[in-house]
Image (cartoon, rainbow, N blue to C red):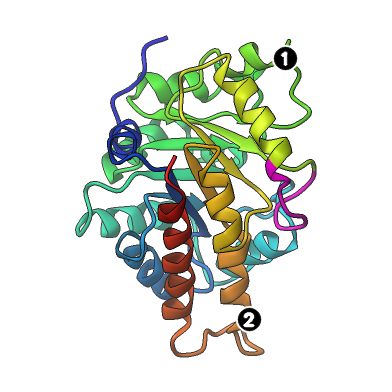
Amino acid sequence: MSQPETRIGRRFQALREEGRSGLVTFLTAGDPDPDTALEIFKGLPAAGADLIEVGVPFSDPMADGPAIQASSLRALKAGMTLSKTLDAVRAFREEDDDTPIIFMGYYNPFYIYGVDKFLEDAKGAGVDGFIVVDLPPEEEGEFCLPTTAAGMNFIYLTAPTTTDERLPRVLQNASGFVYFVSITGITGTRSANTDAVAGHVARIRNVTDLPVAVGFGIKTPEQVAEIAGIADAAVVGSALVNIIAENLDANDKPAAGTADKVLSLVSELAKGVRSAGT
């Protein structure tokens, strides 16, 4: 299957040329409010994020742990919608046309929007790819194949429970990169085991030439450095979302400096990635 030419591919090529792994950051669009969220997103590249996952707020984020579930509900409460999430990407692109943006979420909002119209609007806004948690390869005609035809990447999740027999089917029409979920269960609940991750990354690389990013259970610069020595990128989400949650008042309003605190951790995580090499 031909791979769409996107910022994702260009960024991983640049990382290979630098001889290092990348840092992928996840934050929910509109959390804790649209203005603060956009301030954080705009600051991510300078803080050291190589790729940005934008969580699309959804009322039933079943693969996510309590931290990201709460962030999604805060964003919805603050009035965030899929259309406003696209607007945020457009605003980001006014200042940055290089950093890859991946939407991570669930199929329902995209389906309700209308797949063809959504893909057209997403491409126009500057989205590079999608991770759709609840669409398995058997449903690739719903969104995966249309995404690729529209010139964007569809990134599949693999897990420790993905068998050697299943893996080629999962990755048959994947593009951009492969997202390995390092733990069984939901986000933000346990830490990744580096030795186990290394074995699974090797398994994936036996099946595909796509870069492998590892997420779930990665919270500290030290953990990021360990994963960066194994995989092509490390993904951090819950640790960043938790900083937002820790700096909210009783009405979910962020304290002054909340964005700076999030970006400070991103900078520390980026140092971890850069200390590891590949």
Point out the tag, 1 or 2, that comes first from the N-terminus: 1
Magenta span has 191?
yes
Res. 36 image quadrant: bottom left
Residue 180 horizontal/vertical position (percent)? 62, 35
Disc 2 packing (10 Å; few <14; some 14–19; many ≥20): few
Residue 143 horizontal/vertical position (percent)? 52, 25
Nearer to us in this view, 82 or 215: 215
Nearer to us in this view, 231 or 248: 231
CB under 8 Å between discs 1 and 2 = no
Under mark 1, the amino acid is: Asp
To which residue does mark 2 refer?
246
Residue 27 horizontal/vertical position (percent)? 51, 59
To which residue does mark 1 refer?
164
Q: SS class of the residue under badge 1?
A: loop
Under mark 2, the amino acid is: Glu
Q: Is residue 69 above or below residue 169?
A: below
Query: Which residue appears at 77% of the width and 57% of the height?
Result: 189
Q: Is residue 76 visible?
A: no
- Magenta highlight: main SS: loop
Q: How many marks?
A: 2
Res. 67 image quadrant: bottom right
Please state the extent of the stretch shown in magenta in the rendering: 185-194
Magenta span has 85?
no
Query: Which residue appears at 33% of the width and 34% of the height?
Result: 16
**Quadrant of the rendering where the N terminus is positioned:** top left
Left or right for 98, reference 81: left
Q: Is residue 95 above or below residue 172?
A: below
Estimate the spatial distance between the alpha carbons at disc 1 and disc 2, rounded to whole Å.
41 Å
Of badges 1 and 2, nearer the viewer stands 1
User: Residue 232 shows which numbered tag?
Assistant: none
